[in-house]
Amino acid sequence: MSAPLHQRVDIALGERSYPILIGPRLLEDASLLGTHITARSLLIVTNETIAPLYLAKLQNALQGRRVATLILPDGEQHKTLESYSRILDALVAERMNRDAAAVALGGGVIGDMVGFAAASYQRGIDYVQVPTTLLAQVDSSVGGKTGVNHPRGKNMIGAFHQPRCVLADTSTLQTLSPREYRAGLAEVVKYGFIRDSAFLKWIEANVDGLLAREDSAVMHAVRRSCEIKADVVGQDEREHGLRAILNLGHTFGHAIETASGYGNWLHGEAVAAGMAMAAEMSMRLGWLQQAENDRVVHVLKRLGLPIAPPRIGVQRGRELMGMDKKVLGGRIRLVLLKGLGHATVVDDYADPALEATLQAHFG
Ligand code: NAD
Ligand code: GLY
């Protein structure tokens, strides 16, 4: 018997546990999909870019079920209550009941919106994540954070709702634009910065293979990222503490995304520049050596990611960072580094370190 082409990572959350299956050509494996997508009625939600590439493949693999489809416009600017409403409309129009499931075929935008619709339709139905971007395969499809944007803040409206399974077909990454692919690498290297210095070393040694999208490099990167995320989410599903470390660079990054208009700076790009800011602030606090900060900047650059944000202004940056969901009692909590591979969530940092970092990058 030949070895399965896919690898499996399990996320342990009691009765909400589920597998993440990772491998090439998963979408063509009807038997695997049949094992993990068990609902008889399905609504597949995707967008107008992904539909021509992968919708027929997924439909073929799901023959024998009642399958309805909804194709939404593409883009972060459509991650809105209006698109969410269209998913609910389709579920109602197709008379989907509580035994139906929604299937998110796409990147983080589709995955987050479908998850939120599934969380709220008839007070909660199942959904399955079929992530097709690197960012979605290593981050957004795993862990059950779902939602949409508000014009004044990213992901302001949403719910925690875990998928039934995640099916990450790594072959789909071959059609991603270089820019989108590199944005996903920002979330991959994030795991090295926050939790695993050995993984960071592996990334530094495999930048070329990663940029060339070599199968073995991509598989390892997706798998190790999912293992780290599964471990963190398994310990702190609802972000009472530890899970917040997954947001390294995100408080700065969300300010960049919102200030520049959704979709102009990709999420991963904004996170990359945000991680460079977080590293610099950690250095200003004496928590990171100059050489470690240089490594952060160097690996981000080699991965083709931006390290300098747009000059959005200190006041505006601070105001937007104040909208972050981690703000507690009016104080901006930040994820910073105490050495590479060790992130910490803090609100008792010295204010001048934040001020100097904002002046240097946003001013
Ligand atoms: P995205 O969903 O917008 O996808 C990026 C682009 O790639 C889109 O144009 C999409 O149509 C296209 N695309 C997708 N798959 C493709 C493929 N295989 N081939 C060709 N084109 C393809 O963006 P994203 O980077 O996947 O996700 C970003 C979103 O994820 C943000 O809204 C962010 O807030 C969210 N996010 C959520 C979490 C979470 O935990 N829920 C974590 C990180 C990010
Ligand atoms: N992407 C951050 C989280 O899932 O918590």
Image: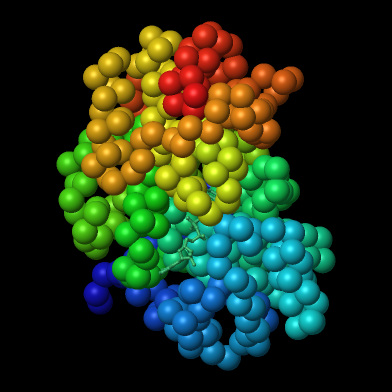
Quarter in which the N terminus is drawn = bottom left
Q: Residue, x 48% and y 86% (percent of image)?
A: 56
The vertical placement of 165 against 146, above or below, is below
Q: Measuring from the top left, give residue 209's x and y in whole percent.
A: 19, 54
Q: Count of labels shown?
A: 0
Tell which residue pokes out farthest to the bottom in this image.
Answer: 64
Q: Measuring from the top left, give residue 228's x and y in whole percent.
A: 42, 42
Residue 23 falls in image quadrant: bottom left
Residue 258 falls in image quadrant: top right
Q: Residue, x 36% and y 41% (percent of image)?
A: 306
The vertical placement of 32 against 316, above or below, is below
Q: Measuring from the top left, give residue 358's x and y in whole percent.
A: 50, 22
The vertical placement of 331 against 205, above or below, is above
In the figure, is residue 96 to the left or right of 251? Answer: right
Q: Is residue 340 visible from the viewing direction of this image?
A: yes
Q: Is residue 18 visible from the viewing direction of this image?
A: no
Q: Measuring from the top left, give residue 303's x and y in whole percent.
A: 27, 45
Q: Residue, x 49% and y 24% (percent of image)?
A: 363
Residue 298 falls in image quadrant: top left
Q: Residue, x 18% and y 51% (percent of image)?
A: 208
Of residue 22 and residue 319, the one placed in the foreground of this image is 319
- The colour scheme of the drawn protein is rainbow
In the figure, is residue 40 to the left or right of 301? Answer: right
